[in-house]
Amino acid sequence: MKILVVNAGSSSLKYQLFDMDEHRVIAKGNCEKIGIGGFVTHKRPGKDDYAAEVTLKDHDDAITLVLKLLTDAELGVIATVDEIDAIGHRVAHGGKLKESTLVSDETLEYLYSIVGINPLHGPPAIKGIEACRKACPNKPMVCVFDTAFHSTMEPVSYIYPLPYEYYEQFGLRRYGFHGTSHRYVAGRVAELVGKPLCELKVITCHLGNGSSITAIKNGKVVDTTMGFTPNEGVPMGTRCGTIDPTIVPYLMKQLNVTPDEMDNILNKKSGLLGVSGVSSDCREVNAAADAGNARAKLAIDQLIHYTKKIIGSYVAEMNGVDAIVFTAGIGENDRKLRQSICTDMDFVGIKMDNERNAECPRGTACDLTAEGSRAKVYVIPTDEEYMIALDTQKIANA
Ligand code: ADP
């Protein structure tokens, strides 16, 4: 069975074609600069990469190009589009939808109805789905939501301490994001520990350009750091994460800025970039900190500080932890940061073996647990696309 996974952003459309029987990616790529020019990269394992400037007016053009490349006599990997059995779409926000869902008119109607609470990621995801529907009208398609895995949270975790009617009127609640990644690495932890997830207490740390941490008890998410939007919790590349909310009206008055301008400050100018003044990229902030830049060091120390704080609170919330896992760009690659986070955590049962941590090759899953640690410590590369392909396969087959 072959599954195409599509991840549509406002000006990009990433794709991966999976051969599920052989458990591998047979082609992947990215259409960029949609609507403002056009550039495509197309990769196949063991073969030369292809990259070209193209004209991409919209997402329809992008998906037409993807299907053309996949079936191209020279660059392709399949003979015809008929070989693709189903298409899985990454959709950031599923609102009330609690699990991956077959695309139908009703699904699309619902996604349109929640654009108000998901203005950034909703419209491009819908465009991606509609473009695929036009290009392949009879192919089964599935939406896999970043929010779905977190739908097991109880009201005590997801209701904000605001007037309750705003939850009812505006759907103002914590949804959580990166759910597909948290679900994937939690499943891998269960395999590595050798126990079912429903018997484990796991903390998954997805630390990347956007970061979120999730507490999973007996297979269910009990808490996660991201909330109504992906700007809650730990500081990120350009997002501030949790701050005193009264700062927002205060700063708006001081700077005389509009709500949109304030939103831009909180989402695009804060976090690692805002504090360091150097970059949103953790590698560049690390390099500046190593070279003696005090604000860069503060930004990194802050990421460590907030992450430790959350892990400690999640251990308290779950009354213990059996395993903690690091994933995503920073979590998978930054050994020093992993070590700093796990230093002086033995009181809550977490001890990392610093040698194992230093020796873990990039891109592989490693057990970093030190002798005497009550909790297992892992680094596991995430694979959201494979998770989407698996859900798509399951639902399309059903
Ligand atoms: P996104 O949220 O865009 O998917 P990623 O998960 O790819 O982000 O993470 C990007 C982040 O990972 C960047 O801040 C980048 O600097 C960081 N990163 C990648 N490699 C390293 C590394 N070797 N050391 C530290 N940080 C790294």
Image: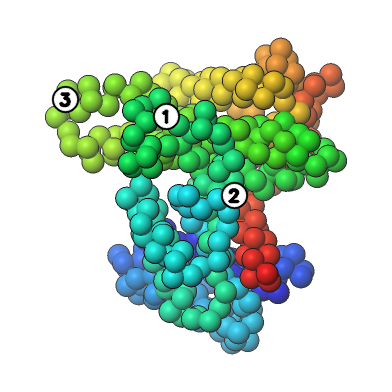
Quadrant of the image containing the C terminus: bottom right
Horizontal side of 348 relative to 191 (left or right) equals left
Secondary-structure class at tag 1: loop
Q: CA distance from mark 1 to mark 2?
A: 23 Å
Q: Which x, y percent locates residue 239?
A: 40, 35
Q: Which x, y percent locates residue 53?
A: 40, 71
Secondary-structure class at tag 3: helix
Q: Is the residue at mark 1 in contact range of ligand 1, meaning its CB lies under 8 Å from it?
A: no
For the residues bearing labels 1 and 3, Cβ distance under 8 angstroms: no
For the residues bearing labels 2 and 3, Cβ distance under 8 angstroms: no
Horizontal side of 69 relative to 393 (left or right) equals left
Amino acid carrying label 3: it is Lys
Q: Which x, y percent locates residue 158?
A: 49, 33
Amino acid carrying label 1: it is Tyr
The structure residue drawn at horizontal position 48% and vertical position 70%, both measured from the top left corner, is: 104
Q: Earlier in the sequence, mark 2 or mark 3?
A: 2
Horizontal side of 319 relative to 276 (left or right) equals right
Residue 102, visible in the rendered structure: yes
The mark closer to the camera, 1 or 3, is: 1
Q: Earlier in the sequence, mark 1 or mark 2?
A: 1
Which residue bears the numbered disc 2? 180
Above-or-below relation of 192 to 132: above
Q: Nearer the viewer, residue 372 or 107?
A: 107
Q: CA distance from mark 1 to mark 3?
A: 25 Å
Which residue bears the numbered disc 3? 253
Which residue bears the numbered disc 1? 160
Q: CA distance from mark 2 to mark 3?
A: 39 Å
| Mark carried by residue 200 | none
Q: Earlier in the sequence, mark 1 or mark 3?
A: 1
Q: Residues within 10 Å of mark 1 (few under 14, many from 20)?
A: some
